[in-house]
């Protein structure tokens, strides 16, 4: 199982970035997939997730209407389109795969189903 995140960088407030998570070793459609972010000194936060079986999506309140999660099954890749970025979006972003659950953030990542982080910095 491999998840490889990319696409981070430095962007000005109001700008956009698209993160990609290339996956291998498992079938995307059988899992939930998601993006998390973490800043130093804080817990990792679930940002967006998508249910592989039916495409149901979930977003944390702070990114609703700005971020969009999607899956390209042909490329085995999960995307996070981030628009209207703000300084508070600065974090290391991680992709993950796991089980869908009835929880505040409905993705429960499996222990070996994490990608490495990609840094997103929003600053003028």
Image (cartoon, rainbow, N blue to C red):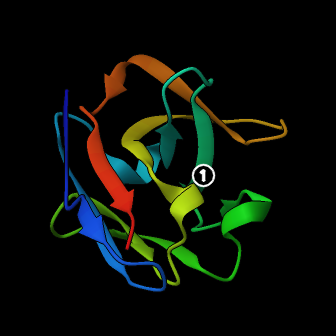
Q: Residue furthest top?
A: 111
- Drawn side of residue 121 relative to residue 46, left or right: left
Label 1: state its secondary structure: strand
Q: Nearer the viewer, residue 78 or 56?
A: 78
Q: Residue at x 24, y 58 (%)?
A: 8
- Drawn side of residue 120 relative to residue 83, left or right: left
| Residue 49 shows in the view | yes
Q: Which residue is mark 1?
A: 47
Residue 70: x and y, percent? 43, 71
- Drawn side of residue 112 relative to residue 41, left or right: left
Residue 78: x and y, percent? 33, 60
User: Quarter of the image holding residue 29?
Assistant: bottom left
Q: Residue at x 39, y 84 (%)?
A: 15
Q: Within 10 angstroms of label 1, few (less than 14), some, or many (20 or more) residues?
A: many
Q: Residue at x 29, y 63 (%)?
A: 19
User: Quarter of the image holding residue 51?
Assistant: bottom right
The quadrant of the rendering that contains the N terminus is: top left
| Residue 51 shows in the view | no
């Amino acid at each position: 199982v491999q998840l490889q995140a990319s696409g981070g960088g430095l962007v000005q407030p109001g700008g956009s970035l698209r993160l990609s998570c290339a996956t291998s070793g498992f079938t995307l459609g059988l899992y939930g997939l998601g993006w998390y972010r973490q800043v130093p000194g804080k817990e990792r936060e679930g940002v967006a997730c998508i249910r592989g079986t039916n495409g149901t999506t979930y977003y944390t309140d702070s990114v609703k209407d700005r971020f969009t999660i999607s899956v390209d099954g042909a490329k085995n890749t999960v995307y996070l389109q981030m628009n209207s970025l703000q300084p508070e979006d600065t974090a290391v972003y991680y992709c993950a795969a796991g089980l869908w659950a009835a929880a505040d953030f409905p993705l429960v990542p499996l222990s070996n189903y994490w990608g490495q982080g990609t840094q997103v910095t929003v600053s003028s």
